[in-house]
């Protein structure tokens, strides 16, 4: 073991690091005590701990409907993004030319371009297509933002994929389609699943686009929270936030587990 | 052959006509004409960059030729996609599917041909037994040793009775002893199946021990082809004599010419050489290749037609043989080998000995 020296400089660095960490994590942690408050506005519990705001979430149709809408939209756009992103990554990997590299860079644009700019553009375009404030409109918009994440994770998996496996498959009589289904996709599954998790998380808490391209019909969970804050400081928001953090953490842990599995393989 | 034995049908013939592959301006394969006879074991032998793997990949359909054609039994298959060619291939590094068991790997070529696993079970079992892997059918490739993976790759390549078996340096990753064992197995497998084998290697020993025919490649062109014995005994060029086995090269000038021999001067000493096939054309500068094992080593001057005195400068002991480096005044450093148990000279550095050989022990070669 290396002997630790508790010099002044070291304490300063450690202190600064922990302060930054606390600054990042505290707001997330504070929502939990707020969510169990016994008051009717956003505050810490005064007399006792109360679960009534959770009960309210699970009994209020407005909240349940928003959750349902978010789940439908996130699931649909995840399926679309995984399908399109995986095909794009495999195609670019297979062609492997200067042009396919350009295509891959082009696919990352939705990450680079500010979301608000995209939202504005999509709003104009969606009006012409007549899909403003519809499920299909939001699903397409979220697919667009999620595809780059799938392309990145799947491309990373493909970088470790032995080209000879593809050649072996073709040599043994498999068509391109059979090769993709039975050899390539099973081998890059961790990357595909990882991309899917990213896509789902991104769609589930995306709000900028939703604010632009929806009005009365579509109310996703983030949009309901946003409205809740504007109307009155209902502590139900804190309980929803806590639930969201729990779900996101679960997905992240799943992703880490998948990565570890891929690395030990 | 019993029913269900892989590759029971007779072998097919393959021909390359003026095959070329260019990468930019450089030719990886440069106008190769080749006929692989039905059911034969042909080896493409050459150093790295000689084009041997490119030719194999073109035959398999993974490299599109820049020019020329590939014929299977006189049918042009140059533009046929790889999955439509029905050729088995054993890849360098085996290329087993890591997410499938051994049995599923071998089922794969049958599965893509629409055969259910139940219907394929007899063929899978037979193929595994043919390579002595029947007991490991449910393992995954990562749980197998290199030699075992090699056997599975072989079983997978022959289970669908391919028209041709292509092997891309299949033994290069294995240790020496295992490699020798598998050479015997591959050869006997070839005899049992009757399938045409095309084998790519840079290992001359593998080529000599297994092949019916060897094609030696250099810079994308065929340098020389023939049966192993002919290539070893009668190399046409310095490159072949040097790449296939070891050789001493004696540079000389023609002195006098007889009916089927000629005398030449090398380093001030006159030596006699049996004539080459183009004996009549031999003139001026001459290059002679002399195999180290064809030199007789003696303590006194031998009675052979050619004899040169020298001094041992280095030697290695290999159990079965001694390898000597002998310094001579006339022709510099020569290498010679002798069976260890009948070695006539005492192996010690500085020992003065004689090197002797007959006129038919060496061959005339072209510089290129």
Image: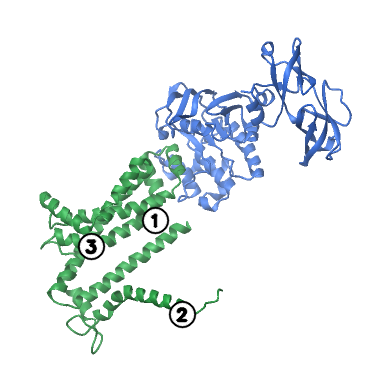
* Chain A drawn colour: green
* Chain B drawn colour: blue
- Which badge, 3 or 1, is on the more N-terminal residue? 1
Tell me if B13 is positioned left or right of A140 in this view: right
Tell me if A106 is positioned left or right of B351 in this view: left
Residue at image coords 33%, 56%: A195
Mark 2 vs mark 3: give the one in front: 2
Q: CA distance from mark 1 to mark 2?
A: 45 Å
- Which badge, 1 or 2, is on the more N-terminal residue? 2
Residue at image coords 86%, 34%: B352
- Which badge, 2 or 3, is on the more N-terminal residue? 2
Q: Chain of mark 2?
A: A
Badge 1: residue crowd in 10 Å (few <14, some 14–19, many ≥20)? many
Q: Chain of mark 3?
A: A
Q: Which residue is labeled 2 in the image?
A: A8
Q: Is residue B91 visible?
A: yes
Which disc number belongs to residue A190? 1
């Amino acid at each position: 073991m290396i002997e630790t020296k508790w010099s002044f400089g070291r304490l300063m660095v450690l202190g600064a690091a922990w302060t930054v960490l606390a600054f990042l994590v505290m707001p997330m942690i504070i929502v939990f005590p707020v969510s169990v408050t016994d008051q009717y506005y956003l505050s810490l519990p005064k007399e006792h701990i109360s679960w009534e705001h959770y009960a309210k979430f699970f009994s209020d149709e407005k909240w349940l409907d928003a959750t349902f809408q978010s789940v439908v939209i996130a699931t649909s756009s995840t399926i679309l993004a995984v399908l399109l992103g995986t095909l794009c990554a495999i195609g670019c990997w297979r062609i492997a030319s200067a042009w396919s590299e350009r295509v891959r860079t082009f696919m990352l644009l939705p990450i680079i371009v500010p979301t608000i700019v995209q939202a504005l553009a999509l709003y104009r375009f969606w009006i012409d297509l007549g899909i403003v404030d519809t499920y299909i409109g939001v699903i397409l918009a979220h697919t667009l933002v999620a595809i780059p994440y799938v392309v990145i994770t799947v491309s990373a998996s493909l970088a470790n994929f032995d080209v000879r496996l593809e050649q072996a498959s073709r040599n043994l009589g498999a068509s391109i389609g059979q090769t993709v289904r039975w050899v390539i996709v099973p081998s890059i599954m961790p990357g595909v699943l990882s991309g899917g998790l990213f896509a789902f998380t991104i769609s589930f808490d995306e709000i900028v686009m939703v604010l632009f391209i929806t009005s009365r019909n579509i109310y996703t969970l983030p949009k309901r929270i946003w409205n809740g804050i504007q109307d009155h400081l209902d502590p139900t928001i804190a309980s929803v936030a806590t639930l969201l953090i729990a779900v996101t953490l679960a997905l992240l842990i799943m992703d880490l587990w998948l990565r570890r599995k891929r690395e030990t393989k | 052959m019993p029913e269900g034995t892989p590759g029971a049908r007779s072998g097919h013939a393959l021909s390359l006509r003026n095959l070329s592959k260019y990468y930019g301006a450089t030719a990886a394969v440069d106008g190769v004409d080749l006929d692989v006879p039905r059911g034969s074991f042909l080896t493409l032998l050459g150093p790295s960059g000689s084009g041997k793997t490119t030719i194999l990949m073109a035959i398999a359909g993974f490299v599109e030729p820049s020019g020329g054609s590939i014929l299977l039994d006189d049918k042009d298959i140059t533009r046929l996609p790889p999955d439509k060619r029905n050729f088995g291939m054993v890849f360098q590094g085996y290329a087993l599917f890591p997410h499938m068991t051994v049995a599923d790997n071998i089922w794969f070529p049958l599965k893509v041909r629409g055969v259910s696993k139940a219907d394929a079970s007899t063929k899978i079992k037979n193929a595994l037994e043919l390579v002595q892997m029947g007991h490991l059918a449910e393992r995954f490739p990562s749980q197998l040793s290199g030699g075992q993976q090699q056997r599975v790759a072989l079983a997978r390549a022959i289970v669908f009775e391919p028209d041709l078996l292509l092997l891309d340096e299949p033994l290069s990753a294995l240790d020496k002893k295992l490699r020798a064992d598998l050479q015997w197995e591959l050869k006997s497998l070839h005899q049992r199946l009757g399938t045409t084998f095309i084998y790519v290697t840079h290992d001359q020993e593998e080529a000599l021990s297994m092949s019916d025919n060897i094609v030696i490649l250099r810079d994308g062109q065929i340098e020389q082809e023939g049966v192993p014995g002919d290539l070893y005994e009668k190399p046409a060029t310095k490159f072949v004599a040097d790449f296939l086995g070891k050789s001493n090269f004696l540079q000389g000038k023609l002195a006098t010419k007889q009916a089927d021999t000629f005398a030449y001067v090398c380093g001030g000493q006159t030596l006699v050489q049996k004539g080459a096939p183009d004996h009549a054309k031999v003139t001026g500068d001459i290059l002679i290749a002399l195999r180290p094992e064809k030199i007789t080593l003696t303590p006194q001057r031998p009675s052979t037609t050619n004899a040169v005195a020298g001094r041992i400068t280095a030697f290695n002991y290999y159990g079965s043989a001694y390898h000597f480096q002998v310094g001579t005044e006339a022709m510099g450093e020569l290498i010679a080998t002798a069976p260890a148990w009948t070695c006539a000279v005492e192996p010690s550095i500085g020992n003065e000995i004689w090197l002797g050989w007959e006129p038919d022990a060496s061959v005339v070669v072209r510089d290129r």
